Image (tube, coloured by chain):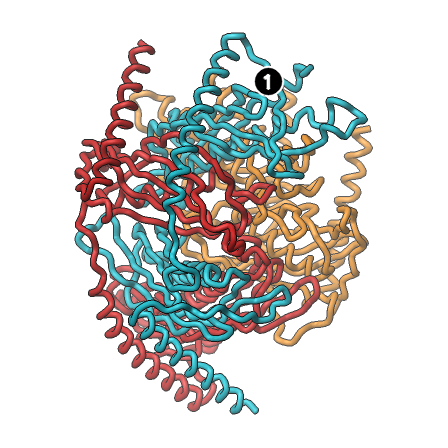
Chain colours: A red, B cyan, C orange
Amino acid sequence: MMSDSNAQATPSIQICRIMRPDDANIVGNVHGGTILKMIEEAGCIIGTRHCNTQRGMCFSGSDVDDDRCVAALARVERTDFLYPMFIGEVAHVSAEITYTSKHSVEVQVNVLSENIVTGAKKWTNKATLWYVPLSLQNVAKIIEVPPIEYSSPEQEEAGKKRYEAQKLERLETKERNGEVITHVSLPEPYTVGFSQSSLIHLVCPSDCTLHGFVHGGVTMKLMDEVAGIVAARHCKTNIVTASVDAINFHRKIKKGCVITVSGRMTFTSNKSMEIEVFVDADPLVEAEKGKYRAVTAFFTYISLDMDNKPLPVPPLKLEGEEEQKRFEEGKARYLQNKAKRLADKAQQQ
Amino acid sequence: MMSDSNAQATPSIQICRIMRPDDANIVGNVHGGTILKMIEEAGCIIGTRHCNTQRGMCFSGSDVDDDRCVAALARVERTDFLYPMFIGEVAHVSAEITYTSKHSVEVQVNVLSENIVTGAKKWTNKATLWYVPLSLQNVAKIIEVPPIEYSSPEQEEAGKKRYEAQKLERLETKERNGEVITHVSLPEPYTVGFSQSSLIHLVCPSDCTLHGFVHGGVTMKLMDEVAGIVAARHCKTNIVTASVDAINFHRKIKKGCVITVSGRMTFTSNKSMEIEVFVDADPLVEAEKGKYRAVTAFFTYISLDMDNKPLPVPPLKLEGEEEQKRFEEGKARYLQNKAKRLADKAQQQ
Amino acid sequence: MMSDSNAQATPSIQICRIMRPDDANIVGNVHGGTILKMIEEAGCIIGTRHCNTQRGMCFSGSDVDDDRCVAALARVERTDFLYPMFIGEVAHVSAEITYTSKHSVEVQVNVLSENIVTGAKKWTNKATLWYVPLSLQNVAKIIEVPPIEYSSPEQEEAGKKRYEAQKLERLETKERNGEVITHVSLPEPYTVGFSQSSLIHLVCPSDCTLHGFVHGGVTMKLMDEVAGIVAARHCKTNIVTASVDAINFHRKIKKGCVITVSGRMTFTSNKSMEIEVFVDADPLVEAEKGKYRAVTAFFTYISLDMDNKPLPVPPLKLEGEEEQKRFEEGKARYLQNKAKRLADKAQQQ
């Protein structure tokens, strides 16, 4: 059924890329996550390509089989990292389809690091990924996978065993996870606890000045990101930054630090929300120095409808004296800014 | 002292860039953080350029004043976002030095959005930033700022007032922040609580497939990032990913979700650490759906010395029965993998 | 016809940005591809802005001419890289419309590197780009370009000559065919097979224009990346882009495609290497459409020592008639460019 030319065209792919400073930690070791992302990109390309071959060719004139799909990752088998990779090396990721069931594709991936200056090469990873083709028209629909050709019946048999084994394991973990999910209890909507959020960010070279200190703009971008998530969690609509209070940068943040950015809602008016954002820096490897607060600021957000007109904001539910006190302080800032805006306007007229 | 040509050369700069999908939220509004980052880049360029003019020129033949510097952001005044900007528009950021004290530079920045298709233009932001020039040789040293020329004595006077006002405010917040810092109490080193970490990530278009679902590789990269931070916090050394256990992707994560990725250490052997990582997805604006657990996995990390040889790992301090139970489970996985590796080796020989 | 205010508003734009670690190789030289991408962004902004001026204004009350457009890159003339740029420097890219035909726009771009610490400035590039305005409603439709005003009839005449010359060349250059097949066994050093490389990139939203087509600058950046890997593999030293031959963009590349970029060395002189680069686009989910060649180009690289002085390049070992023929063609291009440079120099004196 499958023509020779197809059989040759589909089964393998090679991706390569130079490892850049932002792909690695400060001593130059490439993050495992960078490699995992490349592995998955190769798998997604080859899986998607394979599952779309034969689409629309089989039954000309009929529209039955004309459904396009994208391969979605269902499972990654245990993966070992044999050697660290370094900045400036080229990572070669080669992927091959090694088994197909009716509704899934097994992709095996090998990663080779090449030092293009010395010529040294090392196999650093092997990975096995399982993909499922989802229809582009209806994402809940899984499409049939065209079969591949095997070089021998033994090869097919071994693939089938791997398929059965992973299927079993997936079912088991699904049940196990089921339990865990029910444990996730959340605070009541519209409380401070409900929307509060925080992120950590490992400072990378592109975040830094020539001194090796984080650009203030990079810190502000992360602060706005957290504040935006707090605001969106609170009102579940399209939100935009309306203003940022004065921010002081008292302490510098150095390359190699981990930044923790935390936000909590402090005040709501009819049409605005105030979010307090904290930035803490943790100089990971210099243990004695410890974590310190680098920056704090207040962001004000508004909620917009489809025509970019402001929407009412659900009032913040306060719990305890601390939250009440912060709300009052936020209200004072709000009224002060409002008065200032009116004064500015009057002056202009 | 300052020639006219210098006076003209230093005071202003223009930056512009097309707004891309990754700069905006799902309805196309550009993030405030994207704008703040561009504003600060413009300020840093003009501040650094200005503070290095006259370096090495003043007293030719002498090496006294040959210290180069980079302008570090000290403060941003309150900033309003007047209109939202959209994908495809060009953001024009123009910055100008408006005041210099002995050790600081005031930069005023205006942001204009231009729709290059309709020709519509809007002023969207005004910002005022204060920079301090830090020596490249000794980052603790603040360098003297060359004076700018003012168009009138009134202009200089007004700048001086702004300078005094912000100086006062900075001192006040420094004291206030001082209090806050002492409140940061941390769990005991080597406990699970000490190293556990989590991050949130707002899914952006480049993270997604054609369906609008997050690529598995993007999720794995974030998981590795969190696991790496947990490992680094625990052992304060250079750490690298050694292996990842099988990962199942039971539930898809959609564009516009916020992903929370959390990691906690579960087990340590002599030379390795096991970190459990959870991925929760929160479909922000679709409130009824609620947060759900999308993925979980175990990452194993090792710690490396300067020659990339494994270092001993400090043992994990366990608190409570839960942690003890997870440690035993981790130990079982560790022993099982070790046995499997040995069996594989034996088979190969 | 065209009002003065329009004439002043349209013809020029300036883009600038600090060069970051990820923009450069490990010794800090900024990739040629980073510069090419900035050049194209400036060209796209000014081209799109110009082609949309007068839209909807010409015939008030009529809706005939209300078709908006985006400028798509059609061709880049030969571009020389005069000096390498470094991390921490600011790249200033200024673009100006210098000629318009009925359906195309010529943009001339100058790139200046500024060391904001020492104050040193250098002109590093000049480039000429041709854009064609494609309708946003119907991407197959090319829109009429509003004319610019020329300062003199001679200026217009010279522009027309450049226009005719490039038009002729575009027609002549047919798609070059060639395929880079990665060898399983490792070829001998200094052969074509030894250094040839390819990379694969899954097009993401941020790579694309409002039409959903890949920005020419994104493609050129990938091409430079592959050419750089080929050059580094060949000579195992620090290499930088010296020039790019004229590039024609015959076919557009759409969102969701996989781009394969392949490079092979075609010619070496004493101090330079010529690398041929192919870009193939594969519309993954539309398998029947098949892979097609979107762009081809020749990049010239030089090898630099620690002081940024050119190093001798190991001669390319040729195998077979094909390689011999390509080498001769490369030599002809090299001699022609050399002759042109000498002629330009003589003319300037």
Read off the chain for label 1.
B
Count of numbered badges drawn on the protein:
1
Q: Residues within 10 Å of mark 1 (few under 14, many from 20)?
A: many
Reply above or below: B140 against C251. Answer: above
Of helix, strand and loop, which one carries label 1?
A: loop
Q: Nearer the viewer, residue B284 or A255?
A: A255
Residue B215, image x, y percentages: 38, 60
Q: Is residue B268 visible?
A: yes
The quarter in which the N terminus of chain A is drawn is: bottom left
Residue B302, image x, y percentages: 51, 69
The residue sitting at 34% across, 35% down in the picture is A298
Reply above or below: C186 against A69. Answer: below
Residue A77, image x, y percentages: 41, 75
Question: Is C183 placed left or right of C73 in the picture?
Answer: right
Q: Nearer the viewer, residue C298 or A303?
A: A303
Question: Is C158 placed left or right of A311 in the picture?
Answer: right
- Reading the image, the residue beneath label 1 is B148
The residue sitting at 41% across, 56% down in the picture is C256
The quarter in which the C terminus of chain A is drawn is: top left
Residue B41, image x, y percentages: 51, 35
Q: Is residue A145 visible?
A: no
The residue sitting at 69% across, 67% down in the picture is A119
Question: Is C144 placed left or right of B26 in the picture?
Answer: right
Q: Nearer the viewer, residue B289 or C83?
A: B289
Amino acid found under the numbered disc labelled 1: Ile
Reply above or below: C32 against B133. Answer: below
